[in-house]
Every structure is written in C-alpha cells, then in structure tokens.
Amino acid sequence: MAIALIIRKQSPAYSLILGALLGGILAGWGLEDTVLKMISGVKDISPAILRILAAGVLTGALIRTRSAESIAGGIIRVFGEKQAYLAIALSAMVLTGVGVFVDVSVITVAPIILIMAKKTGLPLTKLLFAAIAGGKCGNIMSPNPNTIISAENYGASLPDVMAAGVVPALVGLVVSVYLIVPLVPGKKTEAEGGTLLQTDGQPAFPAAIAGPLFAILLLALRPLFGIKIDPMVALPAGGLVCLLTTRQWRITTDALRYGLEKMSGVAVLLVATGTIAGIIKSSSLSEWLIAVMQGWQGGQLLMAPLTGALMSGATASTTAGATIASSSFASAVLATGVSAVWAAAMTNAGATMIDHLPHGSFFHTTGGSVEMPMGDRLRLIPFESLTGFCLTLMSVLLSLFFA
C-alpha cells in the first residue's frame, strides 16, 4: 500500500504511516496494538533523529557560506577539463562525504555540469551520471542520515561505519568514472570554449573545508584515542567552525534555519519509516528471511545488503531504506555472526542500489537540476544501479576479509 501510494505521488510520510497501520490490522493485531507497535518503531530510531537534526548545522553552514561550491570548484580546477568526469564525480563524492545530502551535492555541482557541457561539449547525461555516482560513493562514508541511523540501529560506532565505506567508495568511484561512464548513452555537442568556473563570493578552499574536516576529526577521536564525541556534538561543531573560518558568522541564523529546514523533512520521513519498521520488526518477516537465506551458500551474509536494497527500492530513498532495514532486521542480521560495523556498512551500501527509482524525489531533483528530459533521466537508472552494486559487492567482500 505504501509503495503504491508513493508511486502515485502521494506524501511518502503519510503513505508509510498508512501502510504500517494497514499492515498491523491485516496481521490481526487490532487497532490499539498496531498503533503501539508503530510508536515503538518510532521510539527505536528517535536517538538517530536527534543526531540528524543536529547535523543540519553543518549542512546549513556549508551551503549558506558557499563552502560547498568552493570545495567542488577547487577539485574541478585541479583536475581540469581532461579529467572532467573524474572531477565532477570526485566533487560530488567529497561534498557528500563531508556531510552534504547526496541530492544537495548533485544540485550544488549542477551549475558546473551545465557550464562544463556547454564549454567542452561533453554529453550532459554522462556528466550528470558522474555526479550521481560520486554522490552515491560519498554517501556510504559520510556522517549523513543513512550512515548515522545504520550505525545507531546496529549499535556500531559511526566513525567505524564511515571508515568501512572508504575503500568501497574509492573503488566505486574508479569503476563508475572509467568503466561505467563510457557505457552511458550521450552524444558530444559543439563546444563553445571560454572560462570554465567563476569563484566570485566564494570562500577560499582551506577555509571552506576546515569545518567538515574538524567534524570528521572529532568523530575520529574515538577509534584513534578512545575519546567518544557524539555526532550530536561533532557535526554542529563542524558547522560553527565553518562559519568562523569563512568569516560569515553574521549569517549564523540563516544557516541554522536552512539546515533545520533540510533536516526537518528527513526527520518527518524517518518518523514515518519508524512506524512501518515497528510493524515489520514485530512480524515474522525477519525469521522468514533467515529461513530462506539459510538455504543459500553464504545467504546469511547477504541479509544486510539485500534488506537495505529492497527497502530503499520500495521507498526510493537511501535514508528510508537504511532506516527500515536496520530497524527491522538488525537483531536477525547480528544473529548470523556478522559484526555490527560491517552489518551497518553493508546495509548502507545496499541501500544505494535502487534508491534512485522514479517514485522518489532523488530521481526528479537530480534530473531537474540540469533540466534533463525525462527519457534521458530514465536511461541513467541501470547505470546508477551498477554503481550501487559495485559499492555493495565491495562492502560484502571486505566484510569477509575483515570478519
């Protein structure tokens, strides 16, 4: 029911809540018991929601100070036109990796994509795919909602889960740029030439990157020195450092308002996904999955990425997919002997495989950012899935190596 409503362009949050309610009633639990299970699901993810709201400080600071533009532009200037696809992909990966939402990262580099297509004649479809692929790679090693909530639900350290995504992300970046981009359909156009980038009003690259680096440094204190700094502290601290190093503390209120606005939508979606996660967690679905996968060779190991992929495909959202999968199947996955860190990392990677389907906002916001026709945007879906599959495969292989 939830999927059908979302596909028909109804509110994802209300669709998920209605789906959860219907699921409980059809299970024979009755209205009161169903509501209690829905509330229980929301309670389970409430700590992660608080951390995600706190992350809005960093997101707001990066966008409103134009630090995100400066970071992307700096990377592209270093690599230049000859490595345009790598530059675009790396820019989106770094932006997402330091805490910018993946769709916001693509939107941030979208003007650069349009300029680059116009000045160099490179196909717009290939450039947009490079940005999307880079964003997916950065998303599995970022302090973004999907990573935060996967780590929270599996009881793993957020820095450890982020670190577990680094190698898959780098491999995914190389595979996407040098193996998948050539397969993406698109024709070159006549280049106009001229200046590629403008930097007016942007902070210097060192000042722009200082805030997110400070946040990541604080998070790294736990695995390095045993000093635990919660993301609820580290991420806002990085945002404040960004405002100070860029000397734009006067826009603090505006940055906080923007960050809260961005995170509020995610928080509402997570509340809704919590309701359906509570229903799934109370059902026998996890036991059924265990029974099915026990018949596969290595099937138990695949439960984490498979549930992440299925749930993200159902909701067309990395965050919602990772939330439902980790909330509903954490105990079942951990019971198979997989470590909490790699369970969270594989769920997170799996959630990137089919989170870009047309019934979600990511599909439309990324295509709309460069005014791409619907047909061209639809043709990118298989190639996006290849990037997600590469990330997931590398995460599974590394989990076997480090287990």
Image (cartoon, rainbow, N blue to C red):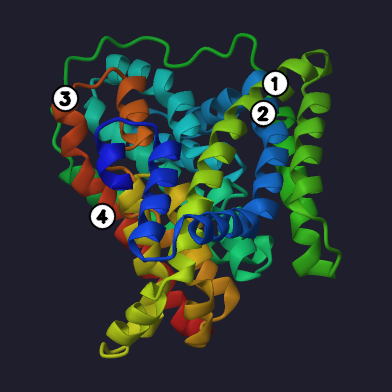
Hey, which quadrant is residue 158 in on the image? bottom right
Q: Amino acid at mark 1?
A: Arg
**How far apart, in angstroms, are the residues tagged by discs 1 and 2?**
5 Å
Are the residues flagged by discs 1 and 2 in contact, CB closer than 8 Å?
Answer: yes
For mark 3, what is the residue? Answer: 188
Q: Is residue 336 visible?
A: yes
Q: Which mark is residue 207?
A: none
Q: Earlier in the sequence, mark 3 or mark 2?
A: 3
Are the residues flagged by discs 2 and 4 in contact, CB closer than 8 Å?
Answer: no
For mark 1, what is the residue? Answer: 257
Q: Amino acid at mark 4?
A: Leu
For mark 2, what is the residue? Answer: 260
Q: Residues within 10 Å of mark 4 (few under 14, many from 20)?
A: some
The label nearer to you, 2 versus 4, is: 2
Q: Which mark is residue 386?
A: 4
Q: Secondary structure at mark 1?
A: helix
Of residues 283 and 61, the one nearer the viewer is 283
**How far apart, in angstroms, are the residues tagged by discs 3 and 1?**
41 Å
**Above or below, 165 relative to 207:** below
Q: Secondary structure at mark 2?
A: helix
